[in-house]
Amino acid sequence: MNSEIKAQLEKLAFKRSKPFCYSCYEETATGCCQHCGSDDLMRLIPEVGCEYGTD
């Protein structure tokens, strides 16, 4: 049951956040930064901030 709740929360986190390249400090539309090519992206929640992962 805990794994089901965690999966639902992770899905919600990805839905509410946007990929963000901290090196270029800009949002990205895909899984790679179009400016620098990095795939080491953070997740950005507007008006809250950014963090690696979904925790």
Image: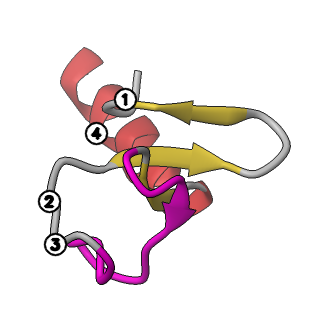
Q: Is residue 22 above or below residue 26?
A: above
How many angstroms separate mark 2 from mark 1 (CA)?
Answer: 27 Å
Indicate the secondary structure of the residue bearing disc 1: helix
Indicate the secondary structure of the residue bearing disc 4: helix
Q: Is residue 45 above or below residue 32?
A: above
Q: Which residue is mark 3?
A: 37
Q: Earlier in the sequence, mark 2 or mark 1?
A: 1
Which quadrant would residue 6 be assigned to in this image? Answer: top left
Q: Nearer the viewer, mark 4 or mark 2?
A: 2
| Range of residues picked out in magenta | 23-35
Report the disc number at residue 39: 2
Report the disc number at residue 19: none
Q: Are marks 4 and 1 in contact (CB under 8 Å)?
A: yes
Q: Is residue 49 above or below residue 24?
A: above
How many angstroms separate mark 3 from mark 1 (CA)?
Answer: 33 Å
| Residue nearest the observer in this picture, 47 or 11 | 47
Please give the name of the residue rendered at 56% of the width and 35% of the height, measured from the top-left corner. Answer: 50
Q: Which residue is mark 4?
A: 7
Report the disc number at residue 5: 1
How many angstroms separate mark 4 from mark 1 (CA)?
Answer: 5 Å
Identified by mark 3, the residue type is Gly
Determine the main secondary structure of the stretch shown in magenta: loop
How many angstroms separate mark 2 from mark 3 (CA)?
Answer: 7 Å
Identified by mark 1, the residue type is Ile
In the image, residue 9 lies in the stretch drawn in magenta? no
Q: Are marks 2 and 3 in contact (CB under 8 Å)?
A: yes
Identified by mark 4, the residue type is Ala
